[in-house]
Image: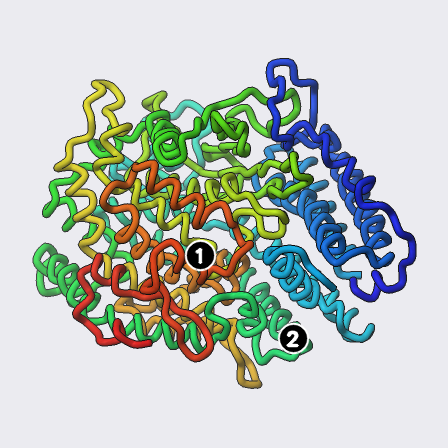
Amino acid sequence: MWNFIRKRGTNIHMKRLLEPFRNHRHFRTHAVDRQNASPTGLYGFDHLKSPEGFQRFADDAIERSVELVDYISGMPSSVEIIRAMDEISDTVCSVVDSAELCRQTHPARGFVEEANKASMRINEYLHDGNLLTAEAHRAAHHLRIDFEKGGIHLPSGKLDRVNQLNLNSLELCREYGENIMNDPGHVDVFPASCIPRQIQHHLKPIYRLTSGVSKESLGSFDDKQEKGFRIITEPRTLSSVLQWTTDEQVRKMAYLKGNSVPHANHKVLDELIDSRQELAQIMGRKSYAEFVMQLNMASSPEVVVSFLLEMSNMVKTKADEEFKTIRNLKRDICGQRCVDLEPWDEAYYQTMLNSSVYDLDSSVVASYFSLPQCIEGLKLLVKSLFGAKFDSVPMAPGESWHPDVLKMCIHHPEEGDLGYLYLDLFARKGKYPGCATFAIKGGRKISDTEYQLPVMALVFNFSRSRDSSIVRLNHGELETLFHEFGHALHALLSRTDYQHFSGTRVALDFAETPSNLFEYYARDYRVLRKFAKHYSTGEVIPEKLVKSLNGARNMFAATELQRQIFYALVDQTLFGEHVSGPRDTSSIVADLKRQHSNEKHVEGTHMHLRFSHFLTYGAGYYSYLYAKCFAATIWKKLCQEDPLSPTTGTLLRTKLLQHGGAKEPADLLTDLAGDGIIRYRNGGIVPDVSSCLEELELSDNGSWLTCK
C-alpha cells in the first residue's frame, strides 16, 4: 500500500473525511433514544439490511480508503497521517469483522455467502515526522509493521506473490474451518442404554430394525425396532461422552472417530503451512513463527520453545504421578488384565476420582448455575469493580441476526455509555461450534469530545435441555463464560486514541491475560455466593461445594498443563523452521505427544486436523500459557484479598484494561503487578511462573523460578 500512497496526489481535509463516521447512531457517546429506533441493518450498520448490502458495505469501505490514501499522499502532519491510516484500518475492519461474525453465526445462507464475498473483496483490496503522543509513536511503528507484513515495501514481483500467499492462506483457513463444521464425524450406538441418561439430550435418537438394518427415526415405530443414539463427535459432545460413558467400547469408538476427522484437512493444513512458510521467507524470516513474533513479548521462537521445554520438565513429575493414579484406578476396577490406560479412558476415570474424592454430582452443581443467574454474575462484576451497569437494551428492527440474541450496554453513571455487547448464547445448526469473542467495532477517539464506542459479540453454544426450560451450566461452562467476558471487558473498557489498539488488539502473547484473570472470579466463593443460587429454591451455593469444585479442578492440574504445553509445542513445530523434504504432520504430532505427554498416541488419529487455534493463533498458542502465568500473578498480588473491591476494579481498569494495545504489555504488567511478573530472556520476555506453579502445588519441582 505504501507504493500506492506515493502515487496519489489529492489533498482532502481530514475534518471532512471524518464526518461520515461521527454520526453513526451506534457509536456516539451521548444517549440514544433506543425506544424509537428506526430500522437498521445487522449490528447497526444501515448497509446490512439485506445480504446484498455486504457488497455496498465493502465498496464504500474501499472507496473511503482510497480517499484516505489520497489525503495521506498530500503529506499532512505526521499525526494526521497516523489518524488517517488508523481510519483506513477502522473502515476495513468494520467490514471484515462484521463479515466474520456473520459467516459464523447467521442462520440465513444468503447472508453468509455475501459476507464471505465481502471479506474476500476487502482482503483482495488490502493486498493489491513529529508525533504528538507516545501512543501516536507506537501506532506509527505498529501500523508500519502491519503494512510491511503485507509486503508493501517489496518490489512488485515479490509483492504480487505475497498478495497471492495472503489470499491463499485466508482461503485455506476458511476451508479448514468449514471442513471441521461439515465433517464432525459420528458413531451410532445400540442399544440406547449404553448412553448415560444425563447426556442423552445432547444426542440424536435413532432406530434400527431388529434384523440389524439401521435407519433414523421418522415417526412411529413398532416392537421390531431398537432405539439407539447417534453421537456427533464434535468436541463438546465428544468430551461429554468420554467423561460420562461407562461402556469402554462406546468411548473408544467415539474417541477414534472424533480424532480422525476431517480427513480433508490433511491437505489443507499442509498447504497452509507451506504458504505461511513461503510468505515468511519472502519477508526475510526463517520461519512463520519468527515472522509473526515481531510485535510479541517473546520476540523469537527460540525464547518460546525454551520456555515451553522448561515448563514441560517442571510439570513432568507431578503429571506422571497423576497419570499413575488414574491408571491404578482403572486396574482396581477392571483387574490386572487392564495393563494400559487408553486415551479414551482418562476423562472417564478422572471424573470418577473427582466424584469419589470430592462427592460431586454434576446435576447438583448445574442447579446453582442457571444461565440467567450467571448473567447476573456478569452484571455483578461490572457493578462491583467498575461502578457501572450492564443491562439489556432494545435493538432496532433488523439489527439482530437471530431471535435469541441479546444486546447489552455498559453504562457508567458519570461517563455515559461505555460500549455495546451482543450475546449469542445457544447452539443451533450451522453456527460456529465453539465459544469466542468477535469484534464488530473498535473504540477510537474522534475528537476531544467524541469517542467511537466499541461493539463486541460473545458467541457460545450452550444447550437447551429437552426436559427443562431453564438452561443450566456446568462449572467449566461458567468459567468459559467469564473467560470470554474478560475479552469483552478488555474491549469495552479500553479508551485508546486509535482503534488499531482498541481492547484485544494487543500483542498476541498478551491478549489472553484479562480473560484468564476473570476465570478466577468464577472460582471464588466470595463472588459465587453473590449470584450462584439454586434455580428452584433460591438457596445460595454452599461454600463446601465450591471448595470441592476447586479441589476437583486442581486434582489433575499438572496433566492439563502438560496437555497445553504439548499443544503449544505442536504449534511451534508446525510453523517453525523446517528442513527440506517431505513433511508428515501426523508423525510430528505423534513424536511430540510421546515426548511431552503421558497420553498414548493411537495410530490413525490426528488431533491437529481440527485444532482451529492453528489458524487464529498460528505459532501463537503459547499465549495461553503466558496468560495463565500473568493472570496467576495478578490475582495473587492484586485481587485475591478482596476480588470485588472497587479499588481493585479501578486498578484493573486504569492500569490494564483501558490501554488496550496502546502501551507495551511489559510496561502495563509491571505497572499493575510489580517487577516480579515478567522475566527477560535472550532478548525476549517470558512470564514469571512462580505464582502459577505455587497455585498448582508444583513450585518445588524446578529451579527455573530464580532464572533471569
Of callouts 1 and 2, the N-terminal one: 2
Placement of 574 over or under 481, stated as above or below:
below
Foreground of the two, 10 or 63: 10
Return the x and y of residue 142 as percentages of the image width and height. 63, 62
Q: Is residue 32 visible?
A: yes
Q: Position of residue 95 (x, y in %)?
A: 69, 43
Density class for disc 1 (Cα within 10 Å; few <14, some 14-19, many ≥20) is some
The image shows residue 639, relative to residue 679, as above or below, that is above
Secondary element at tag 1? helix
Q: Estimate the spatial distance between the alpha carbons at disc 1 and disc 2, rounded to whole Å.
A: 35 Å
Pick the front one: 430 or 416: 416
The structure residue drawn at horizontal position 33% and vertical position 45%, both measured from the top left corner, is: 519
Q: Is residue 193 above or below residue 592?
A: above
- The picture quadrant where one finds residue 18 is top right
- Is 332 situated left or right of 700 in this image? left
Amino acid of disc 2: Glu
**Disc ID at residue 638:** none
**Residue 424: x %, y % from top left:** 50, 33
Amino acid carrying mark 1 in the image? Leu
Using the rendered image of the protein, determine whether residue 194 is visible from the camera's viewpoint.
no
Q: Is residue 378 left or right of residue 284?
A: left
In the picture of the structure, the residue carrying the numbered disc 2 is 278
Considering the numbered disc 2 on the image, is that residue within a helix, a strand or a loop?
helix
Query: Is the residue marked by circle 2 packed among few (<14), some (14-19), or many (20+) residues within 10 Å?
Result: some
Q: Residue lying farthest top? A: 36
Q: Based on the displayed image, in which of its 4 quarters is residue 112 positioned? A: top right
Tell me the quadrant of the picture where the C terminus can be found: bottom left
Residue 668 marker: 1
